[in-house]
Amino acid sequence: MMEKNYDFRKRHFAVHKAGRRNPERLAQANEVLIDASWKIGCDRDAPEIVRRATVDLQDYFAQSMGLSLKLVHAPGSRVLFIRLVEQLPDGDFAFQVSADAICFELAQARHAFTAVVHAEDIMSLEGAPVLPLGRTARRKMLESRSVHSGSGIDDFPDEELVAMIHAGYDCVVIFSQGFDMTRVGPRDFNDIIARAKNFGIGVFFLNYMSAYVHPDDPEADKIIDSLFGEFFRRYPDAEGIALCGESLEFPSKDPHTTGRRHRDSYNDGVLDPRPSPGWYPCYDYPAYLAKIRDAVHAANPKATIQFSTYNWGYQPNELRREFLKNFPRDIYLSTIYDIFASKTLEGLQTPIMDYTLSVVEPSYFFTSECENASLYDIPIAANVNTAGISWSFGTVPYVPVPDHILKRNLHLRQAKQKWNVCRHYCTHHYGYWNCLASDLGKWSTWDNYEPDYDELLLKIAIRDYGKAVAGNALKAWKFWDEAMNYYIASNEDQYGPWRVGPSYPFIFQPDITRTMQSKEIKFPTTPGAHFGHSIIKTLYHPFENANQSPGFLRHPAEIRSLEKMLLLWNQGLAEAGK
């Protein structure tokens, strides 16, 4: 029976899965087993987020472990108690576990759900309500891990916020086109911010607002403040805003650019070959960004501002370094992990043109931007695509390639240590699904702990598929990971068949009529679709690029690569079906 539209939300919101308990799994010598004689609680006057987290853990025991634990408001014998402590030097939270008492210690109330979810994860992976004896302390490695809604564009009911924090993400990203206005219509931003706080989640805005003015204009301060300053006066508890060149154009005086908006880049009907200012590191861009920073921080000095330089990632490193030399203080550089990564296929240049999970190591653009930013003590955020979906496949909730995802996470641990890449935007435009990528993301981003990842993957397979077929799941993942090495990340594929799936029409050439017009089909989309049909290209042809081999050379080799991918993918499917 075909699932009805949006029925996926029922599974998405069911964060506590039934049947996690393995009755054969008993407590080991270094563990305590929580049984029906235990209670769970927090102080009666604890902050709301602590009380919510306590009830969440109570529900987990009931739904996943088959235990009905009474709620109390004082510690005692055989009580799991959650409380704030004045000092916690070794982590954001800690589990203090003995044979007859458990205490979850929180450095701050906002860590309550992170602590509870971590305990739930431990027990689910063990298949039993067990926790290790002694002290277990955890500290987050990152300032934030952010995603868009997994239930719909800019859709944030409480159920979505609960799902998000259980998947390991602590920051919401909202498309902002204005005050209380998103890509899909009006939303009450302050309501989302207030409710997200109840789960320890911050709220970040991806900017689509335009203050089209040059920083030298006498009216610049007034115009910029009326938008960006006013935004943070209206939403004082917002965590921050993410800016990007293509959605933040301004009338630059840099002669290397058109000095005009992208849509106005024509002279007497002829396209100006120079980039518009949103696609070039203009010499006056830093001054423009400084004006935005000043407006934002005048309203909220604690607000985080990020600016993405990906629109000119194709430019020489020397030019990009000069831009960062003049980059305003107190703004995070945001860079991209995978775009522009070099790749060869049968001796041909087939670079990564957009977001994809098919590459493991970071691109030169990413590493060079990080190195340059470090030279000038610029804090660094990154678009990392670790949530399990990128632009590799536009119609699936996640891609089951754990080795690719894990290796990317481990490279990002190194990037944190080397350059302090401290904020992760885990998926761009798409949402997320609580999946093995979520598990890998949570377990690989503790500052003071790393698991045995092979053991972790085995436990995930047993938890999700059962011990009898866990080995088949591991083998299937290996086939799919190998298959992903043969994926083609060209623009014509990612903006067409990979994005759409089996319903892609494959029109290979324009249908020339008396009007001499192309017959490219406008792919049907719902009214709320982000960008509509504009980045779904139904007329299949090479999108040529200066650092890419010509399409007529690439396409035969790419077809051979995709045939290998398909063979391996089907082998994985066969293994998963056993």
Image (cartoon, helix red, strand yellow):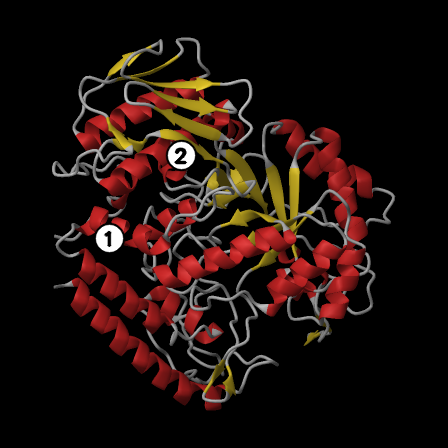
Q: Looking at the image, which is closer to me, 100 or 214?
A: 100
Q: Picture coordinates of residue 331 (x, y %)?
A: 70, 45
The amino acid at mark 2 is Leu
Query: Which mark is nearer the camera, 1 or 2?
Result: 1
- Quick check: can you spot residue 213? no
The amino acid at mark 1 is Ala
Judge from the rendering whether residue 543 lies leftward or rightward of residue 528; answer left or right: right
Q: Picture coordinates of residue 182 (x, y %)?
A: 51, 42
Mark 1 = which residue? 461
- Taking the spot 45% from the left edge, 26% from the top edge, the residue there is 195
- Taking the spot 25% from the left edge, 34% from the top edge, the residue there is 29
Image quadrant for the C terminus?
Answer: bottom left
Going from N to C along the chain, the mark reached first, 1 or 2, is 2
- Quick check: can you spot residue 369? yes
User: What is the number of the mark on residue 161?
Assistant: 2
- Taking the spot 52% from the left edge, 25% from the top edge, the residue there is 107
Assess disc 1: are there few (<14), some (14-19) or many (≥20) residues with their C-alpha within 10 Å of its C-alpha: many
User: What is the number of the mark on residue 375?
Assistant: none
Judge from the rendering whether residue 404 lies leftward or rightward of residue 477; answer left or right: right
